[in-house]
């Protein structure tokens, strides 16, 4: 998968690509922000900004990052005067220095990354000690299962645009999260919701399912 595949998908789709509503996991992000009052938040793989719109204003510094230039340009238009910075950054090889953020978010992104452990390790690296990582992955009944994709290895699928998809049950996700050093699992929750038609690739109502998790990066003194 390359940024070009995502660019192509965004370019072929009426905006906003994923619908106007933020994903339900946004409530978990907002609740955490209210409790922890983070100073810097990054929304990794922000796409055209439906979740970022809700996060903006919850910290003095809010950044939306993506590898798709087309998505970032769309986000720029959609977010208008929303207080956020948009920039190119790869969640698997971030340009941010260690501990740059006290809240690192990736929603509807990690199941599209062929090696999710690499992304999670990088999210941990840019998360400050004492900070939080909030992400989600597709559950096994997510609607993207109807995408015409071929299985290339256990649990990993690729479609004809070269976009990846992976699906998790609770134990599979816990196995991945346990491999991330220096973090404790704060919560894990299965969310499901009905999405109205959106984009040219899913012009019919469908039901999503995602496991949302919150990891707390321990401070050195907690280790
Ligand atoms: C399904 S979309 C979700 C977008 C947004 N988070 C949302 O929920 O509307 C996945 C996004 O992840 C981005 N993405 C994929 N791989 C990435 C990577 N390695 N680093 C940063 N963004 C990535 C894609 O460009 C795309 O915008």
Image (cartoon, grey):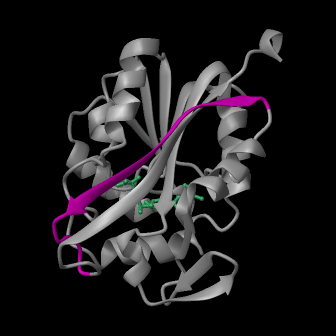
Point out residue 90 in the picture as x, y percentages from the top left corner: 61, 53
Point out residue 5 in the picture as x, y percentages from the top left corner: 49, 77
Q: Residue at x 66, y 68 (%)?
A: 114
Point out residue 170 in the picture as x, y percentages from the top left corner: 57, 54
Looking at the image, residue 35 lies above or below residue 112: above
Q: Residue at x 20, y 41 (%)?
A: 80
Residue 64 visible in the displayed image: yes
Quadrant for the C terminus, please.
Answer: top right
Looking at the rendering, which quadrant does residue 208 occupy? bottom left
The boundaries of the magenta stretch are 182-200
**Horizontal side of residue 22 vs 181, given as left or right:** left
197 is within the stretch colored magenta:
yes
Looking at the rendering, which quadrant does residue 24 occupy? top left
25 is within the stretch colored magenta:
no
Magenta stretch secondary structure, dominant = strand
**Horizontal side of residue 38 vs 199, given as left or right:** right
Point out residue 31 in the picture as x, y percentages from the top left corner: 36, 24
Q: Nearer the viewer, residue 57 or 69?
A: 57
């Amino acid at each position: 998968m390359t940024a070009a595949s995502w660019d192509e998908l965004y370019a072929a789709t009426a905006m906003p690509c994923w619908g106007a509503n933020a994903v339900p996991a946004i409530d978990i992000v907002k609740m955490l922000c209210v409790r922890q009052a983070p100073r810097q938040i990054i929304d990794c793989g922000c796409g055209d900004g439906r979740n970022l719109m809700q996060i903006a204003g919850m910290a003095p510094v809010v950044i939306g990052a993506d590898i798709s230039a087309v998505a970032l340009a769309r986000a720029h238009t959609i977010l208008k005067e929303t207080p956020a910075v948009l920039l190119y950054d790869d969640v698997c090889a971030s340009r941010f220095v260690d501990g740059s953020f006290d809240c690192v978010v990736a929603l509807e992104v990690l199941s599209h990354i062929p090696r999710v452990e690499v992304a999670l390790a990088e999210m941990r690296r840019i998360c400050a000690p004492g900070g939080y990582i909030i992400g989600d992955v597709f559950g096994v009944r997510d609607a993207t299962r109807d995408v015409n994709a071929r299985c290339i290895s256990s649990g990993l699928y690729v479609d004809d645009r070269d976009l990846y998809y992976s699906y998790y049950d609770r134990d599979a996700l816990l196995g991945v999260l346990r491999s991330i050093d220096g973090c404790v699992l704060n919560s894990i929750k299965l969310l499901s919701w009905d999405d109205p038609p959106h984009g040219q690739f899913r012009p019919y109502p469908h039901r999503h399912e995602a496991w949302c998790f919150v990891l707390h990066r321990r401070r050195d003194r907690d280790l």
